Image (cartoon, helix red, strand yellow):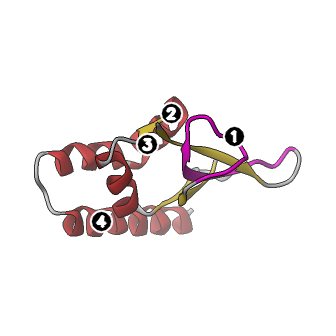
Amino acid sequence: MVRIRLRRIGLKGQPTYRVVAADKESPRDGRFLEILGFYNPRTQPATVHLKEDRVYHWMKNGALPTESVAQVFKASGTMDRWERFKKGEAVETLVKEAEEAEAKRKEAGKGK
């Protein structure tokens, strides 16, 4: 079974994570199938970059996100867009919407 989970990278005491699709049996930092994004919890607000079309592809084929990844997806709005994707919305419109939301977050972060 494939899981979408976090893979830790970074120095000691300075964690950053890759969001990856990996087999459930693989160790946390071991073998993975594909890199789906990046998550840095140390910034204010946390930085999240996802390849949403690939996330939808893996979830459509049965991959399940772990609890921590589900929280990251919920915070970034990916889970809401996933529900809309399941109801039949086009991937292109959802990905474009995600890019616009990320651009807004960057603008808000620069204004501070």
Amino acid at circle 1? Arg
Crowd class of label 3 (few under 14; some 14 to 19; many from 20; radius 10 Å): few
Q: CA distance from mark 4 to mark 1?
A: 28 Å
What residue does disc 2 label? 66
Spatial distance from mark 3 to mark 1, Cα to Cα?
Answer: 22 Å
**Three-letter amino acid code at disc 3?**
Ala
Q: Foreground mark, 4 or 1?
A: 1
Cα gap from disc 2 to disc 3, whole angstroms: 14 Å
Start-end of magenta stretch: 13-32
Of marks 2 and 4, the one in the foreground: 2
Q: Position of residue 20 (x, y in %)?
A: 56, 52
The residue where tag 3 is placed is 75
Give left or right: position of 8 versus 106.
right
Q: Where's residue 94, x and y in %?
A: 24, 61
Q: Earlier in the sequence, mark 4 or mark 1?
A: 1
User: Which comes sooner in the sequence, label 3 or label 1?
Assistant: 1
Q: Earlier in the sequence, mark 2 or mark 1?
A: 1
> Does the CB distance between marks 3 and 1 fall below 8 Å?
no
Decide whether the magenta segment is chiefly helix, strand or loop.
loop
| Element at label 3 | helix
Q: Visible in this render: residue 42?
A: no
Q: CA distance from mark 2 to mark 1?
A: 12 Å
Residue at label 1? 28
Q: What residue did someone put label 4 on?
A: 95
